[in-house]
Image: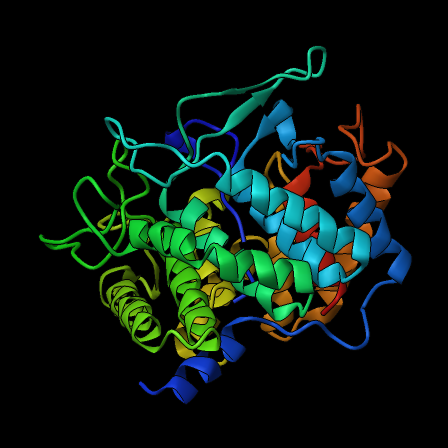
Amino acid sequence: MRMHTRTERKRRARWGAAAVAIAATAAAVIPATSAQAVVPSSWITEQVNFITSKQLPSGAIVGANSLVMPYFANVAAIGLIDANTATSRAAALKWMKWYLAHLNAASTNVPAYSVFDYDYNATTGALTPTGDFDSVDSYASTTLNLALKAYQSGDASLRSYVSSNILTYEAIANLLTYSGTIGVRIASGPDAGLTLAKPSYPVAYTMDNAEVYSGLVDFAALEHTLGRTSQSTYYQSWATTTKNAIVSKLWNSTNNSWDWAYGTPSNTTTFYADGVAQLWPTLYGVVTPTSAKATAGWTQFTTSFPTWYNSVPDNYSWTSVARVAQLMGDSAHATTYVTNLRTRFLSGGWTYPTTCGVTPCGEWYDNEAGWFIEVGLH
């Protein structure tokens, strides 16, 4: 998800039956932190420092364009937890507290337990809600990813916060399972089983739905870990429904590619959303990296953008693509890409550079930093 209007919406990237089956599924979807980082540890520290430098005393994490966008901050917080220092875990907890303290009440096109984006005024320090969000489904799903990641960290404060707020997290998860005024699940029609981005923009995106699947799998695993068996079964069943709908309704067998939204075939030579939509089902665990669909998606992407590891044709860096490369067995190019990104942005202190030797230049922000950490640790 990105900083543009919904029609040119920019997106993002991952972590990601019996109770034993639920735990096994979660383990497959969420990459464990590698014992040996693929970049120097100082590079990880740089990104932790970058994210925490953007965190306000309230816990909000300011992203690009002086905007607190909860989806991006969730990705950053996942990176902070995986960085696994006392400072990074504490910063993630501050963000999680900010998020739950800013849940919306229900109103027209605003489901309860959603969260708006907030504008940050650096002069006054004020945060002002925009009254809108890029999406409901992806904000909620990455919140569930973060909740499980926090609990799995073993950090006592993070574990206590998640377990004591489990009912609130269930209300957030229900945004992804209920339809109508409560949530964004599509209950009837040819696209039933998918989720809408938000009530005011009723489009079922492949990228969003992949994230929804991951969030529900992770939340089922969290509920199982907490001994909440019936709840775990409920959310796992909705994860399965989501996966089945993605595979049956978003895969285009004629084109051998993922449609970027329901009923909208992809032109995979278009980077966003068509091109990167080929990667999201792999990134978020809908399909395994060795599957035919994952291979086809990666082939479509790398054929259209064969030198992606030098620079992607977009105003944002899309560090998440390097994580997909790792999953698809191309770790060398993933490392090349994050090394190139560091060269591009480090000299300017990880700020928006006036020139960086490539066009477009881009901006470094919380989401990219979170994904840099994930790539660097795997």
Which residue, as the protein is rendered here, is positioned at the far left?
189
On the image, which quarter does residue 315 sit in? top right
Residue 1 visible here: no
Q: Is residue 233 left or right of residue 97?
A: left
Q: Residue at x 81, y 38 (%)?
A: 345
Q: Residue at x 42, y 88 (%)?
A: 20
Question: 76 above or below 131?
Answer: below
Q: How many marks?
A: 0
Question: 184 above or below 125?
Answer: below
Q: Can you give x and y, in whole percent of width and height, for residue 282 in the image?
A: 48, 67
Q: Is residue 275 left or right of residue 41?
A: left
Q: Is residue 23 left or right of residue 253?
A: right
Viewer-side residue, 109 vs 307:
109
Q: Is residue 46 left or right of residue 288?
A: right
On the image, which quarter does residue 199 sit in? top left
Q: Can you give x and y, in whole percent of width and height, for residue 349 in the image?
A: 86, 34
